[in-house]
């Protein structure tokens, strides 16, 4: 609380000293794009109008409260109707509203100017992570990846100290170039999510079966953070958005290297891995993709999220287990991970589930098995 | 004045309530049913409030301390559903039951048996809904707006019980509305023309039409959910050719008029209390009636302002922005008229008046944030953040709820024949006023700084305001237990009230003795000019 009061006081001081906006904690962020700046100005105009009207209206109310009291001997007046004044307080607000609507319309029209982009990124919401795909001019998927919450579990459960970007950090951020118009196609795989980066002044719902459009041009390189803003289930509060804006050349170099390393990674799918390699990989994948529902100890949260410990699937035929993870279970929260993970990750995580938490299926799952199963369908 | 009415002397067939507990089960009396509604809504208010305190306890500090995210989501969902459908709406129906027959000069409601049924459905509806919290897989966890497909394909099994409960609540509301309309249109005393009706009666007449128009839409939405879940249809399932956004259009076509269903009767109540304590007639009665009618009409053409981020075309966004901004005009007219009523009055500040003035100020603040939310480009930054939470709590808590509390203090002398303790009432007011502002004002700031709503844990920059908000919530929550104490103390040992109740009170109900007789007006009263508008 002390901290809070100190910050509130410093915020007020700052406002007085600078004569401009209040500290970040008290007001909307100005952001870093042309659009976010326009939105901020619009917000300040409307807020200002509301404050002025508020001062006049509440001023009249409290004037009356303090002066027209029975205890001061006030006698009630007898008026109860006046057509002229009724017309006045209908027409004046209408004019004020028209004044507000003009800049609002201008900003909205500017926001809807989605054409002429330099690059295209698909943003796809999943329970509870984001997938980003760079699309080339023909809408081909050139490079895609998932962006998961990176805050360690023990910070969330208060077993270790929370760091600065608590809940606002991801394992792999979306990278975009500065000064280029980036168009986003926003959609979702399962339920509705919403993609929001406050500093860009853009937010759009990610709706399954729909492609929504957004765009931005960010002049300044930097790291910008946001969160999912549509309730999407259990871990709605744990799917942040991090966008790293790189200088143009740096982005181009990074992007070229990513596309090359993708080809190298695909070659590795043919390799055969040892039990130790599979278990090590699998534990990482499990922690990122499975543990939020099935828990780190594999006990799950039945009945919605079944246990993996002692599960019939984890001790049954290997290919059925693989298929279940690849295809998901329709009508439940179990997703089709075949779309999200590569063959090495799938083989590893299934192998891990079959040999961790006291499970001991005693078999091997290899990337090649995953590819055979996927191709067989 | 009161001695004009000789109902008790004339009617030798008059009988009081039946004896024993079964009185409450079988009763068809408008006052008994009004009482049932009011106590039921208070019980729901405490349960919904308890859930709010679970939410605020978890949000006291960053990190997960008390509940897990899946239970947190059940708390936010059920808090919303219970407060909207279980606390605010039944409280207004309870007030309508108590007051409308007395205010229009009728003996009872027009359809007393249906009145009984429309109340007794509710405990079953809410019994079903609350029982889902104890079912395997938990209760509804998809927000009170239950957006598909989170509420269909991805919902817990208990969603079917939730759908059935919503159907029951809808049936109860529709029956209640039919009864209110039938009473107002058919049972007015001779001389009580429409444009002489008290504002509470006017606002409820319009509200009842809104309910009849939109509750079937809600029933349609949940029935389509039921079919998607159990019968393989794909109304809201994109994979089957359906559209999740269509769910939101249908929901908010119900939902926005629903918002006004929760505030129009409040406008009526405030329009009684301010003139009574300003000892001056309501300013601009005719424009007040037209303003309420305009708000009701506009409520049908603004629904998609809840959905500015779903990706509508530009023309649609502009239409819903402009139509939403229009609502500020009739709402402003109401606020100006209330202030003009106070202007050059002779005011005293008993508890009902304090709550009414707080209503005018704090509801107007909720109106300002509503106007800000109407501005589409700015809404992109506000949407689904705590700014929205602050906005609708400002219009619902110091708005709708304060009006209900004000109504209880104002009409309690008429209902019970007893006065509450003024000092305790004022203490309750100040605790509530401070509590509500400490709770909800900081939420404007955390929303503007970027905190999304419906999250069980948050980034460190939001910590200070959340802690403050939680402290306020506990002050507010416990001061409502104090309200219970004040009311029970008044009922048990309050000083006897006069028939007029308050020096400035006007209206037919104040011509009856206090407490009002069991069958309000057994003979149509004479509608005297000094008791009505116009």
Image (tube, helix red, strand yellow):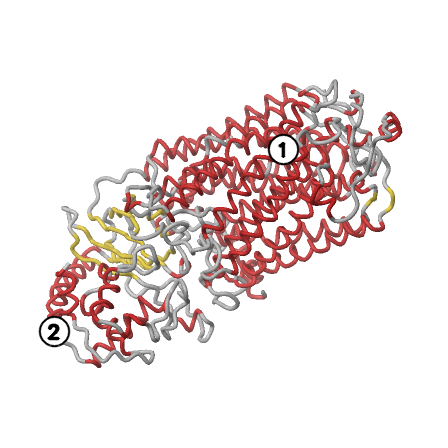
Residue placed most toward the observer, A366 or B109: B109
Question: Dot 2 lies on which element?
Answer: loop
> Which chain hosts label 2?
A
What residue does disc 2 label?
A271
Query: What is the x, y in percent for residue B150?
Result: 39, 51
Question: Dot 1 lies on which element?
Answer: helix
- Judged left or right of residue B397, residue A311 is left
Q: Is residue A202 visible?
A: no
- Judged left or right of residue A288, residue A119 is left
**Depicted A233 relative to depicted B145: above or below:** below
Query: What is the x, y in percent for residue B66?
Result: 53, 67
Q: Residue at x 80, y 32 (%)?
A: B510
Quarter of the image holding residue B526? top right
> Which chain hosts label 1?
B
Residue placed most toward the observer, B531 or B525: B525
- Circle 2 crowding by C-alpha within 10 Å: few under 14, some 14–19, many from 20: few
**Depicted B506 relative to depicted B380: above or below:** above
What residue does disc 1 label?
B335
Both marks 1 and 2 on one chain: no
Query: What is the x, y in percent for residue B141?
Result: 46, 55
Query: What is the x, y in percent for residue A247?
Result: 23, 57
- Judged left or right of residue A102, residue A77 is right
Give the distance between the C-alpha atoms of the residues marked 1 and 2, in whole angstroms: 75 Å
Residue placed most toward the observer, B355 or B269: B269
Q: Is residue A310 visible?
A: yes
- Judged left or right of residue A342, residue B233 is right
- Circle 1 crowding by C-alpha within 10 Å: few under 14, some 14–19, many from 20: some
């Amino acid at each position: 609380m002390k901290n809070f009061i100190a910050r509130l006081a410093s915020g007020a001081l700052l406002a007085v000293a600078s004569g401009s906006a209040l500290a970040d904690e008290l007001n909307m962020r100005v952001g870093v794009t042309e659009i976010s700046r326009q939105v901020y100005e619009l917000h300040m105009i409307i807020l200002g109008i509301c404050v002025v009207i508020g001062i006049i209206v509440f001023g009249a109310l409290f004037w009356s409260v303090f002066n027209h009291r029975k205890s001061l001997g006030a006698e009630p007046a007898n008026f109860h109707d006046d057509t002229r004044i009724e017309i006045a307080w209908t027409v004046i607000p209408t004019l004020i509203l028209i004044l507000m609507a003009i800049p609002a319309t201008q900003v909205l029209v500017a926001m809807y100017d989605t054409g002429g982009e330099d690059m295209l990124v698909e943003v796809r919401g999943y329970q509870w992570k984001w997938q980003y795909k760079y699309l080339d001019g023909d809408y081909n998927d050139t490079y895609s990846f998932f962006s998961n919450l990176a805050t360690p579990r023990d910070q969330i459960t208060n077993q270790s100290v929370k760091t600065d970007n608590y809940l606002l950090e991801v394992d792999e951020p979306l990278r975009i170039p500065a000064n280029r118009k980036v168009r986003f196609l926003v959609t979702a795989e399962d339920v509705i999510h919403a993609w929001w980066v406050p500093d860009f002044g853009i937010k759009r719902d990610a709706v399954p079966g729909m492609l929504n459009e957004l765009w931005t041009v960010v002049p300044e390189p930097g790291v910008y953070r946001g969160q999912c803003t549509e309730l999407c289930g259990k871990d709605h509060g744990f799917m942040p958005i991090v966008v790293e804006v790189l200088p143009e050349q740096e982005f181009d170099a990074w992007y070229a290297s990513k596309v090359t390393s993708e080809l190298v990674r695909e070659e590795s799918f043919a390799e055969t891995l040892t039990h130790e390699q599979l278990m090590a990989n699998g534990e990482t994948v499990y922690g990122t993709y499975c543990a939020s529902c099935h828990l780190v100890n594999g006990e799950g949260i039945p009945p919605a999220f079944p246990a993996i410990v002692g599960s019939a699937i984890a001790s049954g035929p290997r290919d059925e287990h693989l298929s279940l993870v690849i295809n998901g279970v329709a009508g439940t929260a179990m997703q089709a991970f075949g779309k999200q993970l590569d063959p090495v990750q799938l083989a590893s995580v299934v192998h891990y589930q079959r040999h961790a938490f006291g499970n001991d299926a005693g078999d091997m799952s290899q990337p090649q098995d995953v590819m055979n199963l996927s191709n067989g369908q | 004045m009161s001695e004009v009415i000789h109902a008790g002397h004339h009617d030798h067939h008059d009988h009081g309530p039946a004896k024993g507990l079964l009185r409450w089960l079988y009763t068809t009396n408008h006052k008994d049913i009004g009482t049932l509604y009011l106590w039921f809504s208070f019980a729901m208010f405490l349960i919904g409030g308890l859930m709010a305190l679970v939410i605020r306890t978890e949000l006291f500090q960053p990190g997960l301390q008390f509940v897990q995210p899946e239970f947190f989501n059940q708390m936010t969902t059920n808090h919303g559903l219970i407060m909207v459908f279980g606390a605010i709406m039944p409280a207004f129906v309870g007030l309508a039951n108590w007051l409308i027959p007395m205010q229009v000069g009728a003996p009872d409601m027009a359809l007393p048996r249906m009145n009984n049924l429309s109340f007794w459905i509710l405990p079953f509806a809410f019994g079903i809904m609350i029982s889902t919290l104890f079912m395997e897989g938990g209760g509804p966890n998809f927000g009170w707006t239950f957006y598909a497909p989170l509420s269909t394909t991805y919902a817990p099994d208990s969603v079917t019980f939730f759908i059935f409960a919503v159907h029951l609540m809808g049936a109860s509301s529709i029956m209640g509305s039919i009864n209110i309309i039938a009473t107002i249109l058919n049972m007015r005393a001779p001389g009580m023309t429409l444009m002489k009706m008290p504002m509470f009666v006017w606002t409820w007449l319009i509200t009842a039409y809104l309910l009849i128009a939109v509750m079937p839409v809600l029933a349609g939405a949940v029935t389509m959910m039921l079919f998607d879940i159990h019968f393989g249809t794909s109304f809201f399932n994109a994979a089957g050719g359906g559209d999740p956004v269509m769910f939101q259009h249908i929901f908010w076509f119900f939902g926005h008029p629903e918002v006004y269903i929760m505030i129009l009767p409040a406008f009526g109540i405030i329009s009684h209390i301010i003139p009574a304590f300003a000892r001056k007639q309501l300013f601009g009665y005719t424009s007040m009636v037209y303003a309420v009618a305009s708000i009701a009409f506009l409520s049908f053409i603004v629904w998609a302002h809840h959905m500015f981020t779903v990706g509508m075309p530009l023309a649609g966004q502009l239409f819903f922005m402009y139509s939403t901004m229009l609502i500020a005009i009739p709402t402003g007219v109401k606020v100006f008229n209330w202030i003009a009523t106070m202007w050059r009055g002779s005011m005293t500040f008993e508890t009902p008046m304090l709550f009414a003035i707080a209503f005018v100020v704090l509801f107007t603040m909720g109106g300002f944030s509503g106007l800000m939310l109407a501005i589409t480009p700015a809404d992109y930054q506000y949407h689904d953040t705590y700014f929205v939470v602050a906005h609708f709590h400002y219009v619902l808590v110091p708005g709708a709820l304060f009006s209900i509390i004000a109504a209880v203090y104002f009409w309690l002398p008429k209902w019970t024949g007893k006065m509450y303790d003024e000092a305790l009432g004022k203490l309750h007011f100040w605790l509530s006023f401070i509590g509500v502002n400490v709770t909800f004002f900081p939420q404007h700031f955390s929303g503007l700084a970027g905190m999304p709503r419906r999250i069980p844990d948050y980034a460190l920059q939001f910590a200070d305001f959340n802690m403050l908000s939680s402290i306020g919530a506990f002050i507010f929550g416990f001061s409502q237990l104090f309200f219970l104490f004040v009311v029970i103390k008044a009922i048990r040992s309050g000083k006897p009230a006069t028939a007029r109740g308050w020096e400035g009170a006007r209206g037919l109900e104040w011509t009856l003795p206090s407490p009002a007789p069991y069958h309000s007006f057994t003979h149509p009263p004479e509608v005297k000019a000094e008791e009505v508008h116009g």
